[in-house]
Amino acid sequence: MNATVKNSTELTDRQELRQKLITGYNRNKTKIDPNLKRELKHGWLMPYIVQIDNLLWGRWDYWARCQAMPEHAWLRLKMEPALALLENREPNPLPKFVVEQTLPSEPIPKINWEYSAATAKMLDRTLDAIPQSGSWRSWGSLDYIRYFLRWAMYGFGHPKHPELPQEPRRCEGASMRLYQTFDAGLLMLYPEDYWGRLLPEISGKESQQATGFFPTPLDLSATMAELISSDASNDVLETATIRARSFYDPCVGTGSMMLAQSNSCLTGVGQDIDSLLLDCALFQFFLYAPWLAIPIWWLNRSDLLLGDSLSQENPVSVNAKFWYEKWRLLKSKKTVQPTMATVELRKSHEPLEPITMPIATPIANNNGKPSIEQLSLFDVGRYITSTAKKKNKNKND
């Protein structure tokens, strides 16, 4: 199957899925059961996010494969200090050989950004579900947004939010209403910087001038990212090195520039003085750019920093430090360290058939960096594998 036919087929499948989800959402959008009770566990949203992404973009699948370092690459990484000493040079924290042997041979699955008015209405209606009565667009609108983002972060399994957030005053039952109203599938079907569009709507011009938040439209960010990455080589080994490059956004806002750049880079750091904007960016990273939400452990650290990029003060991490701390705890609690692990790998253009390969477990890794067990942090591999088995079963039937 040539690339043109493949892209046409993927577009048709995506359009059909979009229509089904929108039809289903419109049919059920008024059906909120006030008596519904569900025990939402930490990370409960991730199985849905991974499965939907596997049908649409394949980015969480790609993230999982990037986390898996082959044994020979791990040995080469451990040998770097000794080799640098023998060759009388400074140690390279990320040798080119390690990058080339670890990253998938395929390029990063690109997301096609597309705004949807129906998706924006869904997000608006989701926020409207928080107060027991009235609209969320009131004097407490920002508090409602903060609550929703913390509720979503708990659903994503972020270690900073191990417990469900407390419901705002006069919003009793908000968690279950959000559970019935929020549709992550629509956001993933129509990827866009929705927070960058929504926040200016509820902020007057004076408020925007006071905060300095003037979001860059995502389509413009995408054009700028393409220009920045236009020097990318067609050589497989060179593109691996380019994918490992990092970037820095000193005024990240809701993350439009980082989202656009995630089509070509696997690491990046964003900084802002507004914690709400950073939470909005992180929310969108979970949906569209997994490697910016959960860092790839062996690459340069991806992070979101709270602080003034123009001052000399040290900014505070609001994302990566929580993951590295969680991985340190997981490593310290583990009594038996396996020497190999098995992961399911596939090429994006090949049938979903499991390919096993040995993966080194970095037992003696410094700085508390995680072992390869982080692949199953949210049982990502299990959901990818189960989806593959269902597809193969349907084909056989």
Image (cartoon, rainbow, N blue to C red):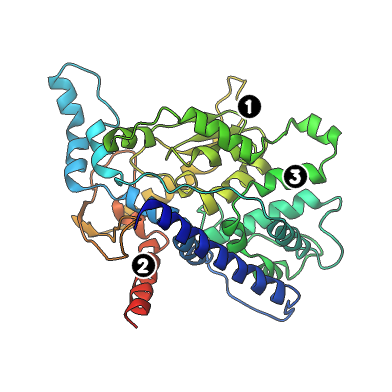
Residue 220 has which mark? none
Q: Earlier in the sequence, mark 1 or mark 3?
A: 3
Q: Earlier in the sequence, mark 3 or mark 2?
A: 3
Name the residue at the left extreme: 86
Q: Secondary structure at mark 1?
A: loop
Characterize the local packing of mark 1: few (<14), some (14-19) or many (20 or more) Cα atoms within 10 angstroms. some
Residue that numbered label 3 is attached to: 199
Mark carried by residue 382: 2
| Residue 43 at least partly seen | no
Image location (x, y in percent) of residue 162: 54, 58
Q: CA distance from mark 3 to mark 2?
A: 37 Å
Q: Residue at x 60, y 39 (%)?
A: 256
Residue at 44% over, 46% down: 291
In the rendered image, residue 331, in percent from the top left (x then y), is placed at 32, 52
| Element class at badge 3 | helix
Sequence-wise, the earlier of marks 2 and 1 is 1
- Which residue occupies 50% across, 53% down? 159
Residue 330 x %, y % = 36, 55
Q: Give the quadrant of residue 185.
A: bottom right
Q: Which mark is residue 308?
A: 1
